[in-house]
Image (spheres, helix red, strand yellow):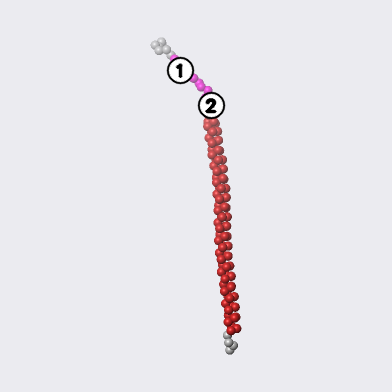
Amino acid sequence: MTNAYPQFTAATVQLNALPYQDTFLKIANVYADSTRASMEQLWISSSRIIMEETIKAFIAASQSCAEALTRNAVAVQQQSFGRLINANQKAVELMGQSFAEAMSAGWKPAR
């Protein structure tokens, strides 16, 4: 039986899938390496910034605390000195009163 249409067999092109898989794997590795490097850089730089800022904050807090303690010591010293002056004045007053009483007792007529 002859057919008016010629018979064509489908051409099967067999592509070796392995080279394409290797290429795609290489491309994926390139992107993975790039992403990994970026993430490492972000992690390391962020950690460094956190450490630096923590140290700066600790130093600033230490300095602020030292300044506050110094101001407090000066204020307490001034108050203490003021109290000492008041105590000296009261002591002089008491000595003066005692001396005046002793002197006036000598001037009183005997009973």
Residue sitting at the far top: 2
Task: State yes or no: residue 19 in magenta.
Answer: yes
Circle nearer the viewer, 1 or 2: 2
N-terminal of the two: label 1 or label 2? Answer: 1
Q: Amino acid at mark 1?
A: Ala
The magenta region covers: 8-22
Give the secondary structure at mark 1: loop
Q: Residues within 10 Å of mark 2 (few under 14, many from 20)?
A: few
Q: Does residue 3 lie above or below 59 as drawn?
A: above
Overall secondary structure of the magenta section: loop
Q: Which residue is mark 2?
A: 23
As rendered, which of 23 and 66 lies closer to the eye?
A: 66
Q: Residue at x 58, y 87 (%)?
A: 109
Q: Residue at x 55, y 38 (%)?
A: 41
In the rendered image, residue 16, in percent from the top left (x then y), is placed at 53, 23
In the rendered image, residue 94, in percent from the top left (x then y), is placed at 58, 75
Give the secondary structure at mark 2: helix
Q: Residue at x 41, y 10 (%)?
A: 2
- Label 1 to label 2, Cα distance in Å? 28 Å
Q: Amino acid at mark 2?
A: Thr
Q: Does residue 64 lie above or below 79 as drawn?
A: above
Residue sitting at the far front: 107
Q: Which mark is residue 10?
A: 1
- Is residue 22 something one can see in this rendering? yes
As rendered, which of 25 and 93 lies closer to the eye?
A: 93
Q: Does residue 21 lie above or below 97 as drawn?
A: above
Task: State yes or no: residue 25 in magenta.
Answer: no
